[in-house]
Image (cartoon, rainbow, N blue to C red):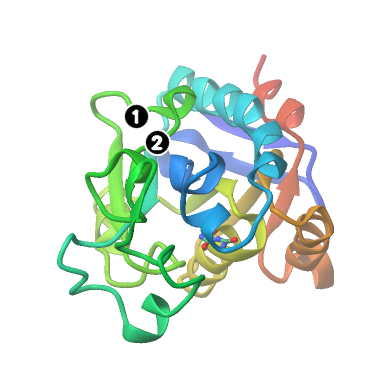
Amino acid sequence: MELGIDAQPAPFSFETTRSALIMIDMQRDFLLPGGFGEALGNDVSQLAGCIAPARQLLDWARSVRMSIVHTKEAHAPDLSDCPPAKLQRGAPGKRIGDAGPMGRILIDGETGSDFVPELAPLAGERVLRKPGKGAFYATDLGEWLARRNVDTLIFAGVTTEVCVQTTMREANDRGYNCLLVEEATASYFPHFKQTTLDMVRAQGGIVGWTASLAALTGAGE
Ligand code: TIU
């Protein structure tokens, strides 16, 4: 289905069969107390407001039968995929691999690394573990999208200026048309979210487009 929506800095058109929703890192480790986000000193309550819009976006993507990728930032239990520089982030005792109330912090398979229940993947949706902030780094995402002939990526998730923006920039350089859904992303720092939205769509859409959830979910109705 070819859709055209109101977006910034200009209207955005895409074919749903050639698009994928990239839901970034909606994990307990970032959204709930006791995880990696809080260990870095952040107020995780800042992210709660994007859960319901992200779920609405996910439901819409399911309804139009779009490809869906859920990314998770998480490391192997032996930390072999975690660079030493990254291991030193956060206060001692609350670093990646340390024990926390939701299991070992940012380690794949632990409760904290899993998705919040509202954003749990369904069968047939891709779960992509990534060791970095960008979803293309050290993953097969590019090959997976190429096999599906995808040319457009619709982004949501956390945090706007870290994993979402990094992945959008990676995708933009790889030739994808990128759209960020404004209500379905959040930062621990609201002004960073706003500035990231502005950065993405400045200069004629230097990184991509942004649109409201309503513009997207109302399209084609
Ligand atoms: N700290 C922060 O804002 N974000 C991350 O570490 N990872 C993601 O954005 N997923």
Name the kind of residue labelled 1 in the image: Pro
Quarter of the displayed picture in which ligand 1 can be seen: bottom right
Which residue appears farthest toward the front when viewing the image? 93
* Cβ atoms under marks 2 and 1 closer than 8 Å: yes
Can you say whether 73 is above or below 220 in the image?
Answer: below
Specify the label residue 121 is tagged with. 1
Question: How far apart are the two marked residues, 2 and 1, measured between alpha carbons?
Answer: 8 Å
Q: Is residue 212 left or right of residue 109?
A: right
Query: Element under label 2?
Result: loop
Q: In the displayed structure, does residue 83 sit left or right of residue 10?
A: left
Q: Is residue 20 visible?
A: no
Q: Which residue is rendered at x = 45% and y = 71% of the image?
A: 174
Q: Residue at x 80, y 38 (%)?
A: 6
Identify the residue under disc 2: 115
Residue 117 vs residue 99, the one in the foreground: 99
Residue at the location (76% across, 36% down)?
212
From the Cβ of disc 2, is ligand 1 less than 8 Å away?
no
Tell me: residue 84, above or below residue 167.
below
Q: Residues within 10 Å of mark 1 (few under 14, many from 20)?
A: some
Q: Secondary structure at mark 1?
A: loop
Q: Is residue 42 above or below residue 133?
A: above
Q: Picture coordinates of residue 189 (x, y %)? A: 76, 57
**Mark 2 / mark 1, whichever is N-terminal:** 2
| Quarter of the rendering containing residue 96 | bottom left
Q: 57 or 77: which is nearer to us?
A: 77
